[in-house]
Amino acid sequence: MTTDTFPASGRPVRARRGLWSRYLRRPVGVVALAVFLLVVAAALLAPLLAPHDPNFVDYTLTKAPPGPDHLMGGDSAGRDIYSRLLYGARTTLYGAAVACLTGILLGVPTGVAAGYFGGRTDRICSSISDGVQSVPGMIVLLIVAAGTGSNFTVLMITIGVFMAPGYYRISRSRALAVRREPYIDAARVAGLTNVQILRAHMLRAVRAPIVIQSALTGGIAMGMQAGLQFLGIGSASTPSWGAMMNDGYRNMQTHPLILLWPSAALGITIAALAFMGSVLADLLSVRAEPGTRAGRGSAPAAGDEAPTGEPAHPVEGSALRIENLRVAFGGPDGDKRVVHGVCLDAAPREVLGIVGESGSGKSQTVLSVLDLLPAGGRATADGIWVGGREIGALPRGRRHALLGTEIGYVPQEPMTNLDPCYTIGHQLVEPLRVVHRLPKAEARGRAREILLRVGITDPDRVMASYPHQLSGGMAQRVLIAGAVAGRPSLLIADEPTTALDVTVQAEVLELLRELQEEYGMALVIVTHNFGVVADICDRVVVMKDGRVVETGPVGRIFADPGDPYTAELIRASLDDTESRIDLDAAHDQAGQAVEA
Amino acid sequence: MKDGDGGPLLEVNDLVVDYRRGQTTFRALKGVSMTIGPGECVGLVGESGSGKSTLGKAILGLAAVTSGTIGFAGQDITRARGAARRRLAADIQVVFQDPYGSLDPTMTIGQILAEPLTASGAPREEARAAVAEMLEHVRLPSDAVTRYPSEFSGGQRQRIAIARALVRRPRLIVCDEPVSALDLTTQSAVIDLFIDIQRETGVSYLFVSHDLGVVRRICHRISVMYQGEIVESGDNERITRDPEHPYTRRLLLASPVADPVRQAERRRTWLGLRVG
Amino acid sequence: MLKFIARRILSGLVLLLVVTCGSFFLAHRAIGDPTPGLLGNSATPFQRAALREQLGLERPLLVQFWDWFSHAIRGDFGTSWRNLQPVSEQIALRVPVTLSVVVAATLLAAVLGLAVGIITGLRPGGTLDRGLKLGSVVFFALPGFWVSLVLVMWFAIQLRWFPAVGYVSPDQSVTGWLRSITLPSVSLAIGAVVMVAEQLRNGFLEVQNQDFVRTLRARGLPPWRVTVHVLRNASPAALTVLALMFVGLLGGAIVVEIIFNLPGIGSLIQSASQIGDIPILLGLTAVTVVFVVIVNLLLDLVLGWVNPKVREQ
């Protein structure tokens, strides 16, 4: 809960002011929009722009090459290709609009309703959508075309019906996601009717994805429409790109240009739509895709900042020692420093606590020791020693060879730290076989033994289970078992009890203490909870904003905090503060004093 | 809507709530009874799965009640739905745990705070004035109105959520773990805000939390929940210092205190309890 | 497990009933009287009435449908109205052609999509990743037949590497068969490849940021072992897209077959819809729906194998 969340918390950065202006700052978006507007303009102004009647037949123009009077030449029937292209744009856009509109009208309301109300509404709507999706649309289109005398609007509506599941899925999944947000519950408690909630919150949530979906759907509809026209379906008197492509196709061996013009027009229009949709999608969901946008943070220089914290043991006799550690993350606005020159150390068999609030850089500090910073993060240090050996300068492979052997790691959130697709047994046995090269039977035996040791009474059942079948406390025991399976000399635990219930937390702390003593490990425990520190730690490092505030033995830190920040944190732990009854009594007294 | 003098504001009687999971039903509340008086803060403590959040949801109408009754100001609201439930919005409000998910990220703070008022048909001008007043109440700058939730820290967002709960001047606020996602220092500031607001407005709180330290600080009375039942109730001082029920004692001993000497002692007692 | 399969087959049958019923009524409504199309415009009213009687068209539609459906689930799709040949024989002649193109395209999409998806997922921001992004934008919307025209113009007419049109049965020559289906399959597959790769890449990036991947690394597992874990977690979305693509490819194949002049179901559908040969249309609809049901069943089985949580639901 109080992990140092960085970068962002995984939530999309919301579109705010000036989505439009941000769109216009993307060159690809501008070009795509310009091309699309050009096509729209060509369609609207076709009667003004077209130099010839698109259906006028001039036999001398048959398969003519481009010339000054006929910019793109003539088709196999002797009609002006340029004029037909302009009029064809009308058909194309009109058809795409009809299809999109049909898809939106059918898909969005049902999708939102299914996602919001769930239950039976959802089951019925979803099975209809799945059904439509498993119907080969082209066959139905051909049947419809055969019967309706190729009525174009009806055909495009039919295409729209087959596009509706796409809209349905998106609206439903958005509505479903939003439905689970507490702000919808808050709106209900605030007295909003379902209609008001749907209008105020749901529509906001689906609006943007629908626009993006429409760009794609429009393109697909244009493609299907051209495909039908290519097959000879549609009115012969209305010029269309698909029919022109068919004409070109039949003459492509001799006159490839006739095929080129309409193909290029269709391809460019669809691509323009697709790029518009892609740029919009990019702008609306700036997902943290590390590495793509900003690259790794550059190695933070030692800089002018003085390192904070001081080691307490000689290097040779330490289990862990960090000197002047800096961590930075690459971001869109340049590097962001989160750890500014931290020094600390732990002796063998010592329990070191690193305490701080969110943003203090405590997790980043220990992840740097593991060389497992989140993507985009980069750590540099004057030196990192494990078991008295400098490892900071080792190549990546050699450093990672320490993981699972010298160094064990216990993460915070038990449920997300086990691979949901594999059994517990597999996840325990795999490192033993791969890293420690144990034969299969022996690895299983060891895994079983460790599970028993961490207090799991039925190891065989647990090993056959998948993570989602375990409780949080059980999963954390499994993770601890995995961390100590390699008999490490240094165990790093990052908020190991934060996600657990209090009674489970006490059990897990007790287990960690026992294992630490039994295996003679050094334990570095990251936490925000001074109660946990008081319970298990020998020495404490207090961190704030990426710096060490103070370091000292646990007794001294609590009895006589050297820094006001430490004192404030201990006070905020609420153990010994006045209860509400004391507070009210004091308040009443103060009130009387004022009156008197 | 006025209750009789001295009577409880909220009265929950033998409440049972079942959740259906596929074919099986899970009894989240097994006959829970409690009362909250006007201007009182009652804490509900328990671990995950104890049913403490479910009780809050049932009172808010977000969980269907199987049997039992919920009375508010002398009125039976157990199965209030539709318009009747919406009328209760003027009197019963909520603050949720998650300071990120509880505010619509696409709305400005002004829109978020005005929503409960405009939904009930209040004129825009009036809503704007009320919003400004509430921001002051929760000690946020008035320019927050035009900004979006993502521009605020966790603690500030929780203040916004409190302001939204207060904006219709309710008589009861259900607080579902409202400080457990916050840093320690922020947490104590928000708790102080809750206390100040209660003194200023006389609102009652049902304060759901897993943290005995937090409820001790803010609640007058505390009920301890375990597996869908209230195992022990009593005033703040007694529950947090001298509990009777074995579960409450285990719970108390299991939460570590920020003092190495006392914690070592507490752990010894806890270990004894565990073995015994 | 068997219960699950049985349930899926049952729901497949329901889907078959609903879809063919819909198509049946749609076709009858749309086509109305098929006899002018079958006999030509010169036929006398008497001849047309006789043919209607012979085809059983004077019966109520519901009776006709039930008659058709009760035979169809036993594999008897009736006879074509045009040449009175059994529908199943004609479909059996055409289906291998279409299937070889569609299956080849699906395999291409699976193999190439997997490869590109893994590479770009491991190295986001690289050249291939940027290419994939561009490709996914462009090829998602471009119709397969448009791509085929471009491919034909280039590879068959300009470079003459592949035959522009025509089909060689594998009985005659395996290499000839492969050459004849290469361009059609490729033009169908391109869009599917980028879609599958894109899904896999996004899934990869998402899974790589999850906590358990860090924990796996912290256990000392070598990178490729970690990649196996990531791949298994990232694959469901890509597999789902692949199955959806299969349905789309069946439809797309119709136009592409006509371009390449392949004797698959495409030209059969086209001619049947022109003259209103409803038994052929219904038979083809039924066969494609059966394929779709089979593919979806396979998908569910694979998804259940990949993700144990799905298995329990």
Image (cartoon, grey):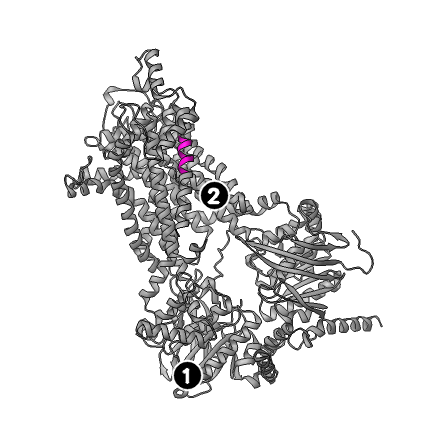
**Does the image show residue A289?**
no
Q: Look at the numbered discs 2 and 1 and tell me whether their residues touch, using CB distance below 8 Å.
A: no
Q: Which residue is farthest left?
A: C173
- Predominant secondary structure in magenta? helix
Kind of residue at badge 2: Ser
**Does the image show residue C178?**
yes
| Residue C18 lies in the magenta stretch | yes
Who is closer to the viewer here, B98 or A364? B98
Give the crowd class for mark 1: few <14, some 14-19, many >=20 residues within 10 Å.
many
SS at mark 2 in the image: helix
SS at mark 1 in the image: loop
Who is closer to the viewer here, A192 or B143? A192
Range of residues picked out in magenta: C15-23
Q: Which residue is mark 2?
A: A126
Q: Residue at x 23, y 26 (%)?
A: A64
Q: Nearer the viewer, mark 2 or mark 1?
A: 2
Kind of residue at badge 1: Ala
Tell me how far mark 2 sits from mark 1, CA to CA: 58 Å
| Marks 2/1 same chain | yes
Q: Residue at x 41, y 88 (%)?
A: A317
The image position of residue A384, as x and y in percent, is 39, 79
The image position of residue C152, as x and y in percent, is 22, 38
Give the numbered dot on residue A319: 1
The image position of residue C295, as x and y in percent, is 34, 45
